[in-house]
């Protein structure tokens, strides 16, 4: 089975599992306890905090450990009454700003319309946007968007869930106040993430209780998950050069499709993108029908984001980019990882070519232009 849905989640790195194992059993102690065994666990948690901080280019005391990207985003945006976000954000952001936000349109290539961003900014006390889109991989002009907001005194939150571990972030180089990241997007465990909070930025805790995380996020720490997150962050830094080479897999995969004469449209191809993500439209074939065939043929991918692909409506990201509903429903998201290989790229292309051939065969001569939506 070829797994090409790494934007949804990534397989845990073996080194991460190995680092976590002692904290499931032998070092199970509550890190808030006073005895020495618990203090050793506390030290391990703080080492992991430092590893996550190093990945983001920030200070360890600016990292608040959370349950993942959704909690981090909701916590960051909690204090603000008027929030400007882009129309293509992850549901965690869109629902967090619902009722107190304005959505900025994007251009057809998937980048925020900078002129509209600046026009809409006055009157907002915070902004939120993703460094890299979860469906298309399109990168936003982070410096321009964040500097425009900072000039007007608005706090800046960036969703870096898809970007962390894939791009060099160095958050201190930008006027960014908050950043959400998640371990399971970079070969770490599920259920753990972090919120970067710049020194001096206000924060209203989402969870109150025992005062963990210096009072910024109460609740007994998910110690094995945190240790795994730290190790995953360390590995991601070490693998940065390998990750940049993943664009070669994209070109190899597309070349195989082109050689077979497959018509394909790339959503977001006009903008700079993450090297491991493709959002492809196969004109005349619904993504739902295609994914139904691809799994038994040996390829796992998505007809949208993992958070929305089970819903029948077309992608809000693609609609915001001006893609008509029917064309949006023809679009697949393919996302690989640093463990993916050229052989997988070739095999994935051949599986898709074969699946398209099978779908084509169900068409009848009497209805030559029928679209497959969906026949099963």
Image (tube, helix red, strand yellow):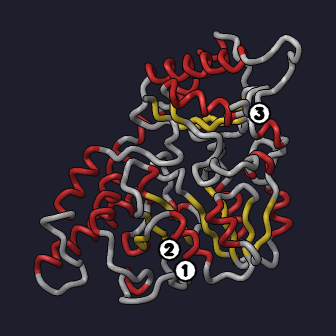
The quarter of the image holding the C terminus is: top right
Identify the residue shown where x is 63% and y is 57%: 130
Q: Say whether residue 266 is visible.
A: no
Q: Quadrant of residue 322?
A: top right
What's the residue at 76%, 45% (across, down)?
Answer: 318
Distance from Cα at disc 1 to Cα at disc 3:
49 Å
- Around disc 1, counting alpha carbons within 10 Å, would you say few (fewer than 14), some (14 to 19), or many (20 or more)? few
Looking at marks 1 and 3 on the same chain, the residue that comes earlier in the sequence is marked by 1
User: Percent position (x, y) of residue 143?
Assistant: 65, 57
Query: For the N terminus, which image quadrant?
Result: top left
Badge 1 is on which residue?
Answer: 201
Q: In this view, does 161 lie to the left or right of 144?
A: left
Instruction: State how far apart marks 2 and 3 are (Cα).
Output: 46 Å
Disc number placed over residue 197 in the picture, else none: 2
Q: Is mark 1 on a helix, strand or loop?
A: loop
Mark 3 burial class by Cα count in 10 Å: few <14, some 14-19, many 20+: some
Q: Is residue 62 left or right of residue 144?
A: left
Q: What number is the disc on residue 373? A: 3
């Amino acid at each position: 089975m070829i797994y090409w849905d790494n934007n949804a989640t990534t397989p845990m790195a073996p080194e991460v599992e190995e680092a976590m194992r002692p904290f499931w059993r032998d070092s199970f102690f509550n890190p808030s306890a006073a005895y020495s065994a618990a203090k050793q666990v506390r030290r391990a948690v703080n080492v992991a905090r430092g590893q996550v901080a190093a990945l983001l280019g920030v200070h360890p005391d600016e990292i608040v450990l959370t349950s993942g990207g959704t909690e981090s985003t909701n916590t960051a945006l909690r204090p603000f009454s008027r929030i400007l976000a882009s129309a293509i954000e992850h549901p965690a952001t869109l629902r967090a700003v619902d009722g107190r936000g304005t959505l900025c349109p994007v251009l057809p290539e998937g980048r925020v319309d900078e002129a509209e961003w600046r026009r809409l900014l006055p009157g907002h006390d915070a902004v939120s946007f993703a460094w890299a889109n979860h469906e298309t991989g399109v990168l936003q002009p982070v410096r321009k968007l964040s500097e425009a907001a900072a000039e007007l005194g608005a706090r800046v939150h960036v969703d870096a869930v898809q970007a962390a571990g894939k791009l060099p972030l160095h958050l201190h180089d930008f006027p960014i106040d908050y950043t959400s990241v998640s371990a399971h997007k970079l070969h770490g465990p599920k259920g753990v993430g972090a919120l970067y909070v710049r020194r001096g930025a206000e924060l209203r805790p989402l969870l109150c209780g025992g005062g963990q995380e210096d009072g910024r996020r109460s609740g007994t720490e998910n110690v094995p998950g945190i240790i795994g997150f730290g190790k995953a962050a360390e590995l991601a830094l070490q693998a940065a050069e390998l990750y940049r080479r993943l664009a070669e897999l994209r070109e190899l995969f597309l070349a195989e499709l082109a050689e077979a004469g497959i018509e394909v449209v790339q959503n977001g191809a006009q903008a700079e993108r993450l090297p491991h993500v493709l959002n492809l439209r196969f004109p005349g074939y619904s993504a739902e029908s295609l994914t139904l065939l691809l799994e038994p043929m040996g390829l796992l991918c998505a007809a949208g984001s993992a958070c929305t692909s089970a819903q029948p409506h077309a992608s809000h990201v693609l609609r915001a980019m001006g893609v008509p509903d029917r064309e949006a429903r023809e679009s697949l998201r393919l996302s690989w990882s640093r463990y993916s290989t050229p052989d997988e790229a070739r095999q994935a292309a051949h599986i898709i070519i074969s699946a398209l051939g099978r779908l084509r065969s169900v068409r009848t001569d009497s209805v030559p232009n029928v679209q497959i939506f969906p026949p099963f």
